[in-house]
Image: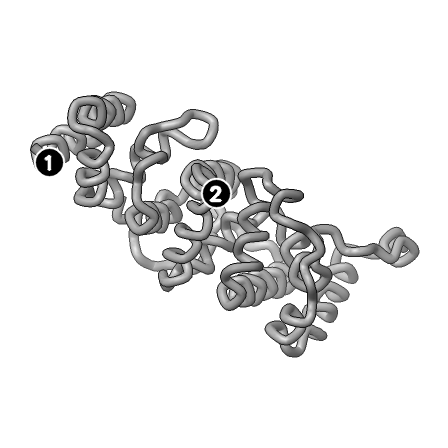
Amino acid sequence: MTQLVIKQTQALILAGEISEAEANLVVLAEKEGDHALVEVLDEMAPKDVLAVMREFDASKESIVNMLVSPEQFVQAIMLERQYGEPIEKYVPRLRNTMNAVMHRTPGACSEVLDCLAEHDEGVRLLADYFIDHYDSLQALAYHGVFEAEVDLEKAFAPKSAITWDSERVDELDQGLEIGDAIEMVRVRMSRSEVADSDWMETAWVLRHEFSDTFELLIIEIQDRLHRAAEAARMPVAESSEPGVPRLEDEDEESAI
């Protein structure tokens, strides 16, 4: 029965009938129970699980998002980068898909982050997930809140883009021992204060329960900011695909 459902679902996905594939899984759960669907999901190829999850996120709930195991989810979501979508599509889709699973129950966020922490590419994926909130993540690391106190006189002083980037790199270079600096800071918010079922709550759980991974994430963020500042000083290179950024240098072709 399990193999038959997997073959049927895979055939529908290959045909581009994602909603029908998800409906096929819903029928299984209705007839055999949630445990039967969990068994099928555990044996499905991660790329097929991802195909269904990409169609249904936190705004459009799916039984797959509600029942997929953290381990299978992480195996699937790690493939998301291989689609090579423009960043304006990739990041919202990634965050919505992750939120649909990580925040389905109060404990799910910890379970998913635990699996991500064990994955070689987990930190890079988290850096993509938080890509619109790097300043907030660094504020959480070094100030214990998402918005650091600002020197208004310095903030509003006129400066060129290059000067701003240079100052930003200098600030990052002063963070000698990132782990020690983070450890000395007490988080000044409770989980209930940031319970948005989105990036803030994810960051809070990561900071409190996975300190080593959080530290690696801050290092990855600072590395990306360094590279962005360096790129701002370089001449703009022509590209045949102006709308599609390269998130990382990867030579391998997509497996999807």
Q: Work out whether 155 lies above or below 226.
A: above
Q: Residue at x 39, y 44 (%)?
A: 84
* Label 1 Cα crowd, 10 Å radius (few <14 / some 14-19 / many 20+): some
Quick check: 219 left or right of 104? right
Q: Earlier in the sequence, mark 1 or mark 2?
A: 1
Which residue is located at x 47 percent, y 27 percent? 59
Residue 147 drawn above or below residue 5: below
Q: In the image, residue 181 lies at what x, y percent? A: 67, 72
141 to the left or right of 99: right
- Read off the residue under disc 1: 2
Report which residue position mark 2 lands on: 106
User: What coloring was used for the rendering?
Assistant: one colour
Q: Residue at x 36, y 46 (%)?
A: 77
- For the residues labelled 1 and 2, the Cα–Cα distance comes to 30 Å
Quadrant where the C terminus sits is top left
Q: Residue drawn 47% across and 36% down?
A: 96
- Res 208 quadrant in image: bottom right
Q: Amino acid at mark 2?
A: Pro
Relative to the observer, which residue lies in front, 202 or 123? 202
Direction bottom: furthest residue: 176
Q: Work out which quarter of the rendered image holds the N terminus and state it.
A: top left
In the figure, 16 relative to 99: above or below?
above
Q: How would you rate the neighbour count of disc 2 (Cα within 10 Å): few for under 14, some for 14-19, many for 20 or more?
A: few
Residue 184, percent from left and from top: 68, 71
Q: Amino acid at mark 1?
A: Thr
